[in-house]
Amino acid sequence: MAPARTIHADLFRVFLLTLVSLFAIPAATLVFTEYALRSDDAEFLQSIEQRIASDTRLSAGDKAEATTFYRSHPLSKACTATAPEDKQFHDKVCSPYSMHWQFHWADRAAIWTLVLGAALLAAALVLGALAFVNRGLRYASFVAGWRLMTVSSAVEVVLQSAMLVWLSFWLTAYFWQSYYVKLILIAGALAAMAVFYAIYTLFKKLPFGNAIEGELIAEADAPRLWDRIRQLAARVKTAPPDQIVAGIDTNFFVTEAPCQVGGHALNGRTLFVSIPLLRVLDQSEADAVLAHELAHLGGGDTRSSAALGPKLLQFDQYTWKMRDGGLSIVAHYLLRLYRMIFAFALARDSREREYKADRVAASLTAPGAIVQSLIKISAYASYRNDVERKLFAQNRQHDDGALGIAGFVAAGLPPYANSDAFVETMKTADVPHPYDSHPPLVERMRNVGHHVSEGAYGSIVSAAPEASWADDIETATAIEQRLWSDYEQRFVQNHELSLAYRYEPATDEERVVVLRHFPPVAFALKNGEQVEVSYSGMRQSVNGGSTTSWDEVKDLAYQGNAFGDFLVVTHHDKGMLGARTSKIKLAGIGKQKENFKAAAGRYWQRHQIMRAQQQQQQERQASSP
């Protein structure tokens, strides 16, 4: 759980970035147009008054009348002059696409974009506040906010993109009487990409899913467990789950959202049970956990989550996609701010739901049973995470065979439960769950009125259950073996990929690992030449072959012009005029350009990660006694 100070700092930072993204471009446009319009008014009035004063054909009365007219009809007001007597003035100064016509509408667009931004910010704050009232209003406020924010943010992108392109021409044209085609093209490309991205993403159906890693438990394979769950559901006064899924994750949960299990779509009420946790829980403790989860079903928590969950996921996907579209980032921070406020409301509601479900479980079983189950689940999850973290941190390859994580955890949990590190961890422990933010353990004990001293944690965790519901699932052992086998295979693969980033390499064995994931990649150039990217650097075949080691590279920049394509390498050492640079000629790279850029960036990133890992290891060794 992140400290409150960090959460508040993140919220404040996102709020400031929201202000910048909503108001920076329209405010700059407004300041520029107002300055230009007022300056032109002053210059024109000064010029026309001088002409009137010097016109000997006009009488004093005519001069006064003409001066009064022009003072009451500045150029900046021509586009808003709609009276019949002002038609000639309007048509002459504010003809379509003229300078004053453009500045007038740019000024109006900037004002209304600022108003829209302020309204959207206010709406985000108000709708976010409504989410704190109750569950029904929370759902309604998010649906309203989802539609308002996504559509309005796309409008913001369109308006601000148009302003940026307009500014790219008129800023230089107004102040320096010239314009830069390249600047306009860049702004236009950014704007076009942002508008396309915003509208395309708005109407694109974003994928979402709810995959559960596990296997279905048929009633014939666990009849006593199914009967017990039905009994508890009746006491909770709710319908029992439609299906039970067993897995090896370190949690229990229920959901009413459509989900995928083993490639099969499930609908209705689903209860997930963890076989490893069932093995450490006594049946009375497991009953308390099951009653807790069924209380979520009875309280409508899962129904609410099923309705809101897919919308939250799609909103999150849309929010982060808007960060990737260049100028579309102007909409990202508003969406993110609204989501953060809504997350606070969800977190508060989640804690209240957990407290209520704990109280229900305590009343149906015993306060001691729910507290002891929480201690055991927290301990198992904490220790398993510690075991996996240490296995992943090892700098040697794991065997392709079974890692035996389950065995490590089972054998090491009792000693761990009696260690000082365990007690410190449990002081702030919470129970892992895929959908909710659970309160800390000590608060949950206080909620059900049953306190267990820290000194008793170890004996509770170390005590072997007299009877386990896992023993009543005939397929439990086979399911565990299959799931652990798949899980450990992925673990070994991900660990090896991590090693490919960590190794320099320094030995032949390490080189085999690195080359498996980062083999040399050659790109053909003109005249039979080529450039090769490898884990050690980039090698050119020209001039007898020259190699640029990754240790020499401080920065990379790809450049293409009429004279060819180059990769500009900035080195760490200094040259005559700043940092030394060199060029890797890429004549004839053609359609391979993007692949080359991706390869060079990926291999250089690998090298940087490897060196950073080495630095951290050296610092740890230096600081250790």
Image (spheres, rainbow, N blue to C red):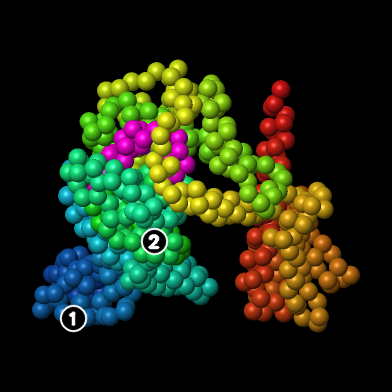
Q: Which residue is mark 2?
A: 260
* Residue sitting nearer the eye, 318 or 512: 512
Residue shown at the point (58%, 50%) measured from the top left: 488
Which comes sooner in the sequence, label 1 or label 2? 1
Query: Is residue 53 toward the left or the right of residue 625 in the image?
Result: left
Q: How many marks?
A: 2
The mark found on residue 294 in the picture is none
Residue shown at the point (24%, 60%) measured from the top left: 148
Q: What's the magenta region?
A: 274-299
Kind of residue indicated by mark 1: Gln
Q: Which residue is mark 1?
A: 88
| Quarter of the image that includes the N terminus | top left
Q: CA distance from mark 1 to mark 2?
A: 71 Å
Instruction: Examine the rendering and report whether any part of residue 345 can be seen.
Output: no
Label 1 crowd bin: few (<14), some (14–19), many (20+), radius 10 Å: few
Q: Is 285 within the magenta?
A: yes
- Vertically, is 363 above or below 550? above
Q: Picture coordinates of residue 418 (x, y %)?
A: 53, 22
Kind of residue indicated by mark 2: Gln
Query: Is residue 147 toward the left or the right of residue 286 in the image?
Result: left
